[in-house]
Image: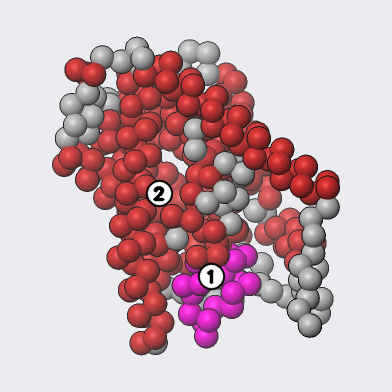
Amino acid sequence: MEEKKPQKTPTSLIISSLKLIIAFAIIAAAIWQIKVTWQQIDPKQIKISYIYLFLSAVLYWLSMMCFGVFWARVTRDMGGKMSAIEGSRMFLASQVGKYIPGKAMVIVMRCGMVNKNRISVPLAAISSFFEALTMMGVGALVGAIFIAIAKLKDAGLLLLISMGMAVMFMVIVQPSIFMRILKVVSKPFNKNGDDLAKPVQYRTIVTSIHWQVIGWVLMGISMAICSAGIGKSLWNMQGLLLCVGGNAFATVAGFTVIFVPGGAGVRELAITKTLGYAIGPLGAVVAIMFRLVQIIADIIALVVLYPIQLRSIKDA
């Protein structure tokens, strides 16, 4: 006999509906705000340079590779076997998963690409989760520092939110706290009480965290190049500070809204507001163009790297 699928309770249906309503409301509000800003733009100010946009994609790929190196180091510390090249390759190929609501598809895709003889699926998922939380914590801190150095007027609330997110994520990824959370979360699925992963050593975090910082800086520079790709240069100290800090803050803010795919709308609105201090309404154009560059870059990475990763597993 076929087992009946568990039906959703009225409470779960209400919660799911509320999540969808909130997600659509956030996206709609962001789109409306960006549309208002867009109306202030003179189309003659926009001059597309495909060379700059391509270079922006290249810098974006490099930034993702840096995060992939950190993930590989964390995975090895937890008991798996993964080279920096493998980590970078799988990290890049899985980025399209972030456009699926819930953001869990990124982890699912990575688990599907790992060599099961070297890394267990639970370990790959756990190390991915740890890396993502660390990435957000470092990103929020980078955002706060770079925005503070830029000395923006009326940025007090922005800095407060950014530092708050940094503290929250950094506390969660403390090895002892993370392992306790892991035991509670995995209890329903790990009835034997086995250790699914070893704790990450503080030494590993300290000696590897620079890859996270480099990744965020490269992504910010990627956005500055994207700005040049629409004819608006941000090649000055404040412009670069705003690109690095604004992109980091916006990305983390988008991540915290879990049920909005890829932080859609939230991230663009944050970038629009931040870059508005330097280039006014054109910040909206940069935000949208940078999103398009990343989407195209993520699709290319998946198409090219996914088959290579699967082939490497067969040849191993």
Residue 4 is marked as: none
- Give the magenta range: 110-127
Residue 39 picture quarter: top left
Q: Is residue 164 magenta?
A: no
Check disc 1 and report its element: helix, strand or loop.
helix
Alpha-carbon span between mark 2 and mark 1: 22 Å
Query: Does residue 78 appear to the left or right of 50 in the view shown?
Result: right
Check disc 2 and report its element: helix, strand or loop.
helix
Kind of residue at disc 2:
Gly
Q: Nearer the viewer, residue 139 or 43?
A: 43
Q: Position of residue 312 (x, y in %)?
A: 36, 80
Kind of residue at disc 1:
Cys
Q: Residue at x 17, y 35 (%)?
A: 49
> Quadrant location of the N terminus?
bottom right
Residue 221 picture quarter: top left
Residue identified by numbered label 2: 215
> Quadrant location of the C terminus?
bottom left
Q: Nearer the viewer, residue 158 or 198?
A: 158
Q: How many marks?
A: 2
Q: Nearer the viewer, residue 287 or 214?
A: 287
Residue identified by numbered label 1: 111
Color encoding of the figure: secondary structure
